[in-house]
Image (cartoon, grey):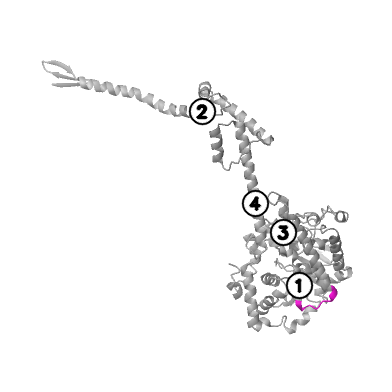
Amino acid sequence: MKFYISATGIKRVTISNSGKGSLVAPALTLASRRISGSRALLPVVLVLGIVLPFFFVRVAFLVLESPSVCSSSLDCIGRRLFSGRDTSLRLREELTRALIEAKDGTSNDGVQVSLESFNELVKEMTSKQQDVKAFAFKTKAMLLGMERKVQSARQRESIYWHLASHGVPKSIHCLCLKLAEEYAVNAVARSRLPSPQYVSRLTDPSFRHVVLLTDNVLAASVVVSSTVQNSARPEELVFHIVTDRKTYTPMHAWFAINSVKSAVVEVKGLHQYDWSQEVNVGVREMLEINRLVWSHFYNNLKQENFEYEEGHRKYLEVLSPSCLSLMNHLRIYIHELFPDLNKIVLLDDDIAVQRDISSLWELDLEGKAVGAVFGSSCGDNCCVGRKYRDYLNFSNPIISSNFDHDRCAWLFGMNVLDLEAWRKTDVTATYHKWLKLNLNSGLTLWKPGVLPPALLALEGNVHPIDPSWHVAGLGHRFPEARREMLNSVAVLHFSGPAKPWLEIGSPEIRSLWTKHVNSSNKFIRKCRIMG
């Protein structure tokens, strides 16, 4: 027996026996035919596997298209199965027209929607089979509703942020209690301030007198320490700290225990002043009228809609209780507090000193009572947020006929005061004249605060000083001052709701103040003031 194999492949096998002819294997021939047929069918299956998914996606897309384009899904499939480019163009044009109509229109036949999410919008459109125009109007209504909610949330967050600024932190309250307790049990905490050998300096005009009106022990400590640390001649500094009766004990205890090297510190309570009856009546009248202004402003704003009125945000700050603070308003009686002094530097308690301020006492105020920075250090003629119109009511003819609404207002916080010129021009009497005029005008001449009536009383009596001395507004949410400028300015003023002893301000900005806090002090540590 012999085997014969074809050279072109195993298509045929011939078995030959000697003398008996040949035989072809039928089974092998049949198998080879099946293999050949399978190979011919494989390309067809692959092509169908690629084409059919695109075909199904196209059919599904046509079925889901707007009913306004075709009368039925089958009609869409039959007419536009192979006209995708034209269909897409027509859909785009139709959607564009619908969006423009929704943008210019106010409603879609009075249809009201209350859709809260994209999923609800999809469900609404697919279940009711609405056209592109309805989709555009419903989308517009949903977006407008979301915008109103976002705006409302921002307004409420702003209100809560301002409310947070009105409170006294638990840590500062703890500090006052601990110091008051120390005053009661520790004789050192009750020791005389200043020491007897330094009493003569309190009225000596050759020394540099710094005045601070405050009821905040921690803030006062930062003002004093930062001023002394940056002073070229701290031995020439005399600090006069005036506080209320409630805070006198802890304030005295702090500076008695934590003596300041070189400089002299005096702590005096308002209850220790022996004022005349005329001054007492004037102070009460000042506080009462300012309280009426605050109440009038507050009652009017209660009737307004804070939800969607963006302009009302700026009024929240002036409704702060600090606008009624006795310590803030007493600066108009500064000449009565220090009858024996002629030139002083008045500092607010929400400041930190970064540079030697000794040359402030050498400034020539040219006969004016006050030296102050006008506007801000953002450039010439720049006083963003600090113009007269931001403090005074120019709808009243008394104000509009006497003042320019675009005029830059000067800043409280760091001021040089010539008390001799103050007494000569009788600033306090002018201040009271404006108070009475405001009372007779329905309390509408200015907004609540310390600065508005001071702008009127000191009109023409303020000398401008270089803006590099003082930068304000660091207590706002987004301070305008650049970090490079903050490093070079002499006095940082955290005016605004976010005081540096609160945790609602920028950590980066607060660090410029907190670095002056004596974190090693046992009372600071016990009350966890710095966390």
The foreground one among 334 and 293 is 293
Which residue position is annotated with label 1? 210
Which residue position is annotated with label 2? 63
* Inter-mark Cα distance, 3 to 4: 16 Å
Which residue position is annotated with label 3? 317
Which residue position is annotated with label 4? 154
- Amino acid on which disc 1 is placed: Val
Q: Residue at x 34, y 22 (%)?
A: 40
* Inter-mark Cα distance, 4 to 2: 43 Å
Q: Are marks 3 and 4 in contact (CB under 8 Å)?
A: no
Residue stretch rendered in magenta on the structure: 271-278
Q: Are marks 4 and 2 in contact (CB under 8 Å)?
A: no
Task: Look at the picture and state if 185 lies above or below 83.
Answer: below
Residue 234 rendering spot, x and y as whole percentages: 72, 75
Q: Quadrant of residue 105?
A: top right
- Amino acid on which disc 4 is placed: Arg
Q: Is residue 74 left or right of residue 296?
A: left
Q: Which mark is residue 326?
A: none
Q: Is residue 51 visible?
A: yes
* Inter-mark Cα distance, 1 to 4: 41 Å
* Inter-mark Cα distance, 1 to 3: 28 Å
The foreground one among 429 and 421 is 429
Q: Quadrant of residue 131?
A: top right
Q: Is the residue marked by circle 4 packed among few (<14), some (14-19), or many (20+) residues within 10 Å?
A: some
Element carrying mark 1 = strand
Q: Residue at x 79, y 66 (%)?
A: 288
